[in-house]
Structure formats: C-alpha cells, structure tokens
Image: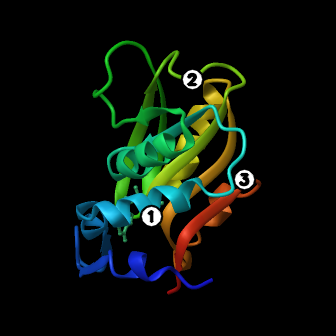
Amino acid sequence: MLPPDWLVESVQEIPDFPKPGILFRDLSPLWRSSASTSRCAIALAQGLGDIDVVVGMEARGFLAGLITAQRLGVGFVAARKPGKLPGETLSVAYDLEYGTDTLEIQRGALSKGERVLIVDDVIATGGTAAAAVKLVELAGAEVVGIRAIMELVGLGGRTMLEGHDVSVLWEVKG
Ligand code: AMP
C-alpha cells in the first residue's frame, strides 16, 4: 500500500532525535497545513462503523485522536502521563522505543461497554498502543480498533496488538 503524497510530503525524518540511533518522524509539517490535517482526519476515520469515543495518547496522539473524533462525531478521552489528570485515575505502565512510561485516564472517563477507537500518531514498538488497550479494558470498555498515521513496521509493534483491528495510513518499512 503506497502512502498518499500529501502524507509523504508532511513528514520530516530527523536522525538521532531524541537520542542517538533514533530516526524520529516529525509530523509538525502535517499539522501546520490545514489541508493536510483535514485529509488526515478523513483518512483516519475512513471505514469505521459504530464508535462511541476515541482515546488518544499523550502527546501527539491528542492531535491525531481529536481530529479523528471530530470527523466521527464522537467525544475524545486523553490518555495522559502520570500526575497530569485530576481525581482518581486508572493507570498502566509500558515500555517505549526510548525509555519507559505510564499512561492514565480518569476513572469514569469511559463507561462499561463503550466502543472505543484508539488513535496515535506513530506505532513504533507498539507499547504505547498496548498500554492504551489495557487502560480501555481496565475501564470495562471495548477496543474496536487502533489507528495511527504511521507504523514503523521493522519494530514489530503489531505483535503487541494481536487480535485487534489495526490500520495505519503509512507502513514505513525498515
Ligand atoms: P511505541 O510505544 O514504541 O509504539 O511508541 C509510540 C509513541 O512514541 C508514539 O506516541 C510516537 O509519538 C512516539 N515515537 C516512537 N518512536 C518514534 C519515532 N521514531 N518517530 C516519531 N515518534 C515516535
């Protein structure tokens, strides 16, 4: 599957960021363009049926998740780093491509049985998306799909997301 031109033109590859050996995919040019942002929302929401709510992960998943939620006409829940959300939270620890972290949502943000779409900008190792799956399930809601703008296929993130409907706009090989 070839990625659309507007997406390829919207991504900058930054070597050795945030640390040596990481080729960082910077989507800032995408968000800088209203036309690309609209196309991205349409593409991320395409083919999805019955969704009650979108969950997006801090921080760049907020951007991709919120535009997808708007396009679908549903609400958005932010999965945040520890200590950012007031009140009681549900929390899951996970490994990153570069480090470890924890994701939280507010207790009560999702209702039991709600149909949830998880959205992030990039799937790398899959750890962040897998943590989001656990959070949604901890809340008693149902993960009906996982969407991302890019997937770094060589990192094998899909193995952590087996059994889920995962779809991305650009599968980057290598
Ligand atoms: P992971 O948990 O390894 O799938 O990492 C996914 C999260 O880390 C996403 O939220 C991305 O924003 C970020 N990320 C990891 N690796 C990269 C990369 N090479 N370029 C851009 N973002 C990345």
**Residue at the disc numbered 2:** 110
* Mark 2 to mark 1 CA distance (whole Å): 28 Å
Give the numbered dot on residue 141.
Answer: none
> Sequence-wise, which precedes: disc 3 or disc 1?
1
Residue 163 vertical position relative to residue 80 in the rendered view, above or below: below
Q: What quarter of the picture does the N terminus occupy? A: bottom right
In this image, 79 relative to 151: left or right? left
Residue 52 vertical position relative to residue 108 in the rendered view, above or below: below
Q: Amino acid at mark 1?
A: Arg
> Sequence-wise, which precedes: disc 2 or disc 3?
2
Point out the residue furthest to the front here.
Answer: 35
Which percent across, then down, holds residue 122? 44, 63
* Mark 3 to mark 1 CA distance (whole Å): 24 Å
> Sequence-wise, which precedes: disc 2 or disc 1?
1
- Residue 126 in sight in this render: no
**Residue at the disc numbered 3:** 164
Q: Nearer the viewer's eye, disc 2 or disc 1?
A: 1
Tell me the crowding category of disc 3: few under 14, some 14 to 19, or many 20 or more residues within 10 angstroms, Cα based: few
Q: At x 68% / y 50%, what residue is drawn?
A: 48
The reply to whether the C-beta atoms of the residues labelled 2 and 1 are less than 8 Å apart is no
Which percent across, then down, holds residue 32? 23, 63
**Residue at the disc numbered 1:** 39
Q: Secondary structure at mark 2?
A: loop
In this image, 17 relative to 100: left or right? left
Which percent across, then down, holds residue 93? 46, 40
* Mark 2 to mark 3 CA distance (whole Å): 19 Å
In this image, 41 relative to 47: left or right? left
Q: Secondary structure at mark 3?
A: loop
